[in-house]
Amino acid sequence: AMQQPSLAAGRLRTCSQVCGAEVMAFKKQFDGASQHIDPDLREATTLGTGRAKAAPRSSSGIGVPPVLIWYGSETGNAERLALRAAKELGSVAEVSPPPTTQDEFMADLMHRKSLVLVLATWGDGVPTDDAIPLFSLLEALASGGQALTTVLPISVYGVGSTLWPRFNVAARRAVQLSTAIGVPILAPLGEGDASKGDLDGQFEDWLQKLLLPALCTFGISPKGGEPLLSESRPQLQAHAAPVSLVVRSCERLAPGDPVARYFEVELSGSLTYSAGDSVGMARNL
């Protein structure tokens, strides 16, 4: 299978919400980007490309939600599921992408009781761009035989597709690395399979039957109020800018996926774009 270029290399992500046309070849892979995310969960967030920190808290841990939820998301599926878990837990939860430095990593874990990871696997079995710093830190700790100074029981849910050869590799690797550095596993690994459809239903089963009961045995129960969000991505905006497009190459992404393709295209005309922007193709009628 071919590994897709990283976001930094200028990968153009495709989804039906942005371009306004249904792109069947990517329908399942990009369901997350086309689904609604509760705007109420975004009200307390700071939009932007950086990781916005929550308001300073006391050194005693007062006001720190005991459950920390980190998500690694490329197309929006894992982010949406993480927000779903946070809303179910209410004010005892905080949700954000993982931090980018070891100092932030350790600071975020202080005064917590449990960590939940919702991680998508992207391309040829790699973590999403926003989860790479987390994996780099875990790999460094594991290879150096180091243990975390703050150890929290962890629960991991993976988002992937069995149409791809390396199904949910990121989530499985996160469990392996966590165990290697002495982190106990609280709820069993959950695995969402996009090829089966109804990712939300699959996640809901894991949430209600495994995660919430496991947290309750650890003394953590859902509580009224809204979860704390430390960061959110900007809302996607659609802009119509028709340009000429020539397909220069086309490769199969996964042997088991009958429709997914990686295209390299040449655009002409007046168009500005940056890494992470989306492109859509519509048939001439």
Image: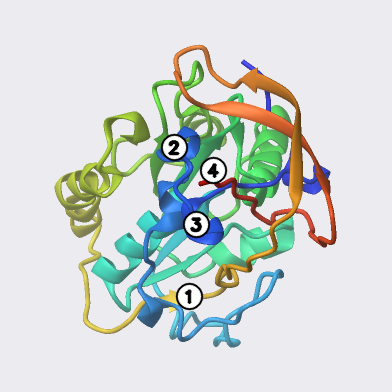
Q: Earlier in the sequence, mark 4 or mark 1?
A: 1
Q: Nearer the viewer, mark 1 or mark 2?
A: 2
* Location of residue 66 with respect to 147 vertically, above or below: below
Cβ–Cβ under 8 Å for marks 4 and 3: no
Please give the residue where the numbered disc 4 appears in the rendered image: 283
| Residue type (three-letter) at the residue carrying disc 1 | Leu
**SS type, badge 3:** strand
Q: Which mark is residue 229?
A: 1
Q: Which mark is residue 246?
A: none
* Residue 283: percent from left, percent from top: 54, 43
**SS type, badge 2:** helix
Q: Residue shown at 73%/36% (left/top)?
A: 140
Please give the residue where the numbered disc 3 appears in the rendered image: 70
For the residue pair 237 and 150, the one nearer the viewer reads as 237
* Residue 285: percent from left, percent from top: 50, 46
Q: Earlier in the sequence, mark 1 or mark 2?
A: 2
| Residue type (three-letter) at the residue carrying disc 4 | Arg
Q: Residue shown at 47%/24% (left/top)?
A: 259
**SS type, badge 4:** loop
Q: Earlier in the sequence, mark 2 or mark 4?
A: 2
For marks 2 and 3, give the CA distance.
30 Å
Q: In this orientation, does residue 45 appear?
A: yes
Please give the residue where the numbered disc 2 appears in the rendered image: 24
